[in-house]
Image (cartoon, helix red, strand yellow):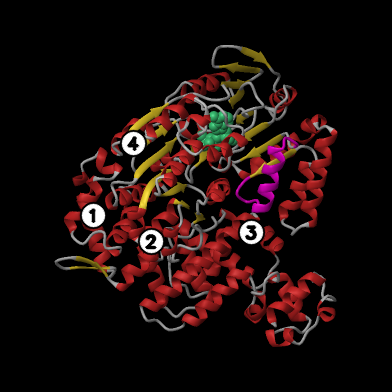
Amino acid sequence: MEIYDIPLNSEWLKVFEDEGIRYLYPPQEEAIKKLFSGKNLVVAIPTASGKTLIGYIAILRAFKMGLKSVYIVPLRALAMEKYEELRRFEKFGMKVALAMGDYDSPAGYLKYYDVVIATSEKMDSILRHDLEYAYNLGVVIVDEVHLLGEASRGPTLEMVISKIRDVNDEAQIIALSATINNSQEIAEWLNGEHVYSEFRPVPLRLGVYYDDTLLFEDGEKVEIKHDAINIGNLVRRSIELGGQVLIFVNRRKSAESLAEKLRRRVEGYLNEEDKNELYALSDSIMEEEYTIYSERIAKLIRHGVAFHHAGLSNRHRSIVERAFKNKWLKVIVATPTLAAGINLPSRTVIVRDVTRYDGFSSVYIPVMEVKQMLGRAGRPKYDKYGEGIIYARSEKRAHDYMEMYIRGEIEDIESQLSNESALRTHILALIASDMINKEEEIFEFFKKTFYGFKMPVENLERKIERILDFLEEYEFIKRKRLLLATPLGKRTSDLYIDPYTAIIFRKCYEHNFDIFCILHTISCTPDMNPIRAKRSELEELFSLAYTHELAIDEFDVDQDTFFGALKTASILMDWIAETSQDKIIERYDIGPGDLHGRVELTDWLLYAFGEIGKVLHYPHIRNVENLRLRVKYGVKEELLPIVSLRGVGRVRARRLFDSGFDSIEKLKRANVSTLIIIPGIGRKLAEEILKQVK
Ligand code: ADP
């Protein structure tokens, strides 16, 4: 089937042709034919086999009929990607919005858009604020629906789908999935059609590598001598065959050290163009804002290798991705976060580690995740086939991995909704958004979820009872004839925080608190993700606990959280004392990505902390607002008036302040020539500052 055979405006379809899509892949054809029936649809096909197109066609079909759609994705980076792609249709009058902003922002304006792209958490928060939004929807695309089975994000996704269906059973749900075993079951749950295919546009050859042997699934053996770093020659073989290599390891440190070790083995394969481009990128890294990774990344990419993990800054991550997409970079050594994110195909994928540390011991990574990594192999249009190889330390293990991961079946996905913390949050949300007012209705609602589709909801009875008791005891709901949320309950739900977070906040308000205590409290909540404390740091952290009066003690939360929160609070204290980013990163052995991630979360949770304080009528809110701004910008209080100027930031604000420009008033009296003598302030920025203050 040709793209122009789809019964839509040919001008719209030309957008796809321009991208290189002329003929539909067989599963795309099947799915697109089915979606035109208007029924719900579950499409399970391998990674990189063109699921997105199916979603876009459904959106265009809705647009043609004057219906609205949403595209729900798991990550913000993916939302950005889809947004940029869908904006290609704006010239045909389609209004496209990326639902951004924090979880407490009003959502009413979104109903004026034809397509809204949101993460599942954002969509959930939209529905909490404005359930009516769901009435207007014609089509709902759910990307990566197999994430229903993931403990941390699954429940939210399941609730979003269930809520939309509960409010508006006319909306067509198009769920896109990896090839999981029980996708048929999801289709039955959604009462929809099912398309399953293992078709891949670029065939994938899977194999294992051990000792000196690369053994493919079909029995073919290739001799490749292993070297001091085991996979060095395997990597070289792939590059010699004309491809790039993506290697997955289980720890950040391993990603960094393996990339270092591969340097000498890869550099010989760079041609002049590669070198020119990589050198230019390397120089640009050194000219920009410095992080501890700047030098290492800048140095490594000159040799055609890089590492990639969540500790890198966004900027560095995107440079590495771009250099790889352009084929200048030959090898990336990454942690699995990369497999879940952006589309970055490579001819060869090597999974070096199939185990990971789960906090207690080393465990095998699920088949689903390993297949997802291996499935990244093969670049459409460039490669005749891709190679996905698992490294094993012995022949015995190699055979085990072949059975387990290559020939083995992907695990069925199971609903994660029965998790107590998820239930607590979502039951409160159902009551607070007035979807449910009676206890029986909770059961009715859960019958319609994926959980309820597979299991008798009576299994949840005791848990739900306990949760209602808990919500009542802590004054989130009133439970008389009807279930009603209190102002605290409503605010907690709208703020998109766990009720337990609100309880921890309250405990802090009841305490006589200082800044350290607030930051520690915030870091103890289930909505934070405190930086893990190392064993060697425990003693120091323990004494720190004694020098402060903390609101949350070792009995309120588990030990890991308690100490992690102490470490996180210390990091944040250094941050707002204007300690340089490098120093913080070095002192605590973390990455810039870790620091910025926590700053962003703390900014959000301090807002929530202040809001909960308001509902409970506690004083001191002003101090909390100031603290929030200090965390946001990483400054001492005295810089607050000037740091929020566009283009200024913590370092320049300090320089301005120390040069005597310590208030907006003083800046008003400044001129370009007095400002440009301050290091880091050029003419353009000086003009920009003056424009803002005047
Ligand atoms: P996924 O299934 O992982 O969502 P994508 O939708 O991102 O995969 O598709 C991967 C790549 O394949 C994209 O670059 C897309 O442009 C391309 N593609 C999709 N369908 C076709 C097609 N029918 N012909 C050629 N290229 C296609």
Q: Residues within 10 Å of mark 1 (few under 14, many from 20)?
A: many
Question: Can you say whether 52 is above or below 199 in the image?
Answer: below
**Number of the front mark, 2 or 4:** 4
- For the residue labelled by badge 1, is the local secondary structure a helix, a strand or a loop? helix
- Residue at (50% x, 54% y) in the render: 95
Q: Which residue is mark 4?
A: 186
> Mark 1 near ligand 1 (CB under 8 Å)?
no
Give the quarter the ligand 1 occupies.
Answer: top right
Choose between 141 and 432: the one closer to the eye.
141
CA–CA distance in space, label 2 to label 4: 28 Å
Residue 548 placement, left or right of 658: left
Q: Are marks 2 and 4 in contact (CB under 8 Å)?
A: no
- Residue at (39% x, 42% y) in the render: 148
Where residue 292 appears, as percent x and y from the top left, is 72, 55
Hey, which quadrant is residue 141 in on the image?
Answer: top left
Q: Which residue is mark 3?
A: 588
Q: Residues within 10 Å of mark 4 (few under 14, many from 20)?
A: many
Question: Could you say which disc has been placed on residue 511 in the image?
Answer: none
- Check disc 3 and give the amino acid type: Tyr
Question: Could you say which disc has been placed on residue 498 in the image?
Answer: 2
CA–CA distance in space, label 3 to label 2: 28 Å
| Magenta-tinted stretch | 309-328
- The rendered magenta stretch, by its main secondary structure, is classed as helix
Mark closest to the chain's N terminus, 2 or 4: 4
Q: Is residue 3 magenta?
A: no
**Number of the front mark, 3 or 2:** 2
Mark closest to the chain's N terminus, 1 or 2: 1
Mark closest to the chain's N terminus, 1 or 4: 4
- Residue 215 seen in the current view: yes
